[in-house]
Amino acid sequence: MKFEEKRLLLKPDFCFYHIPKCGGSTIRATLYDFFSEIYKKPEMYCPEKSSIKYNFGSVEAVKEFVANKSLEQLSQIKILLCHTRYNLPNISDKFGEHKSSVILRNPTSRLISHYEFFDYPKTKIHMNKLPKDQLEEYCIRMSSVTTEYLSKNNDVSEALDNISKIDFVGDISKLDNFIESIIKFYCKKFEISDTDHKITTRNVNSNKIIDRKLADNVFEIISELPDWELYNQLKLEKII
């Protein structure tokens, strides 16, 4: 069976569109524990809980994931908790009708966290120690990650339109509220008492860096670039 045909078997009931460094690992763990009470293990895909650890950040990753799953395994998946680009051709555009969710983060904070998590282990240079030209180059290059995950053409207007179609939209500053809204919906759907579900979240990352001067410098570089434009518009519309 060709990739396109096989991929059509993946039609989740719920998808968490995890944008990198937006509290997603914590959300994935919390929701996985909750959904485990409703769905069977083969019906849920979360990289941390699987022997096949793929995120859907690229078409190549999706192709490998599909190739490594049987037809039955793909058709069983109802809960999808991983990095996934919203409505991007050959990734999630053929999921069909499903409940969708995404959580966002202040772009300056997200970008600093992204560098410290992914780049510092390789460079061994904290972001606040980068030369000015390297800092500027990195910030500009990474200033539209959120917009890219939410639009096909890295377009703010398209991202805003897509976000309006997502069922659960939150901000990391109100992490528990975001998770609670999802849990309450599914408790009502499956007639489960939501009083039995206490939300306990914790930051699993120990590499946080708090530097006001760095944050100001990063903001100055990216304040008029896509992710901040998107974030400001969402705040203006009171979506987050």
Image (cartoon, rainbow, N blue to C red):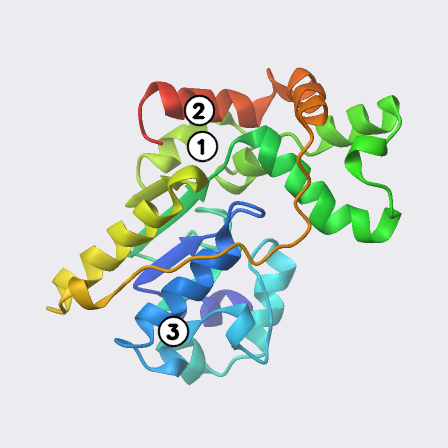
Question: Does the residue at mark 3 contact the one at mark 1 (Cβ under 8 Å)?
Answer: no
Left or right relative to 78: residue 56: right
Q: Residues within 10 Å of mark 1 (few under 14, many from 20)?
A: many
Question: Does the residue at mark 2 contact the one at mark 3 (Cβ under 8 Å)?
Answer: no
Amino acid type, label 3: Ile
**Any mark on residue 157, and which?**
2
Nearer the observer, 194 or 11: 194
Q: Secondary structure at mark 2?
A: helix
In the image, residue 211 lies at what x, y percent?
Answer: 69, 30
Q: Residues within 10 Å of mark 2 (few under 14, many from 20)?
A: some
Left or right relative to 236: residue 53: right
Q: Which quadrant of the figure has residue 42?
A: bottom left
In the image, residue 57 lies at what x, y percent?
Answer: 59, 53
Question: Does the residue at mark 2 contact the one at mark 1 (Cβ under 8 Å)?
Answer: yes
Q: Point out the tag, 3 or 1, that comes first from the N-terminus.
A: 3
Q: Is residue 122 visible?
A: yes
Q: CA distance from mark 2 to mark 3?
A: 31 Å
Q: CA distance from mark 2 to mark 1?
A: 5 Å
**Any mark on residue 77, and which?**
3
Question: Which residue is under mark 1?
Answer: 159
Q: Residue at x 54, y 77 (%)?
A: 50
Amino acid type, label 2: Ser
Nearer the observer, 61 or 186: 186
**Any mark on residue 28, and which?**
none
Nearer the observer, 29 or 52: 29
Q: Which quadrant of the figure has residue 114?
A: top right
Q: Residue at x 38, y 73 (%)?
A: 77
Q: Secondary structure at mark 3?
A: loop
Q: Residues within 10 Å of mark 3 (few under 14, many from 20)?
A: many
Q: Is residue 94 visible?
A: no
Quadrant showing the C terminus? top left
Q: Is residue 198 above or below residue 119?
A: below
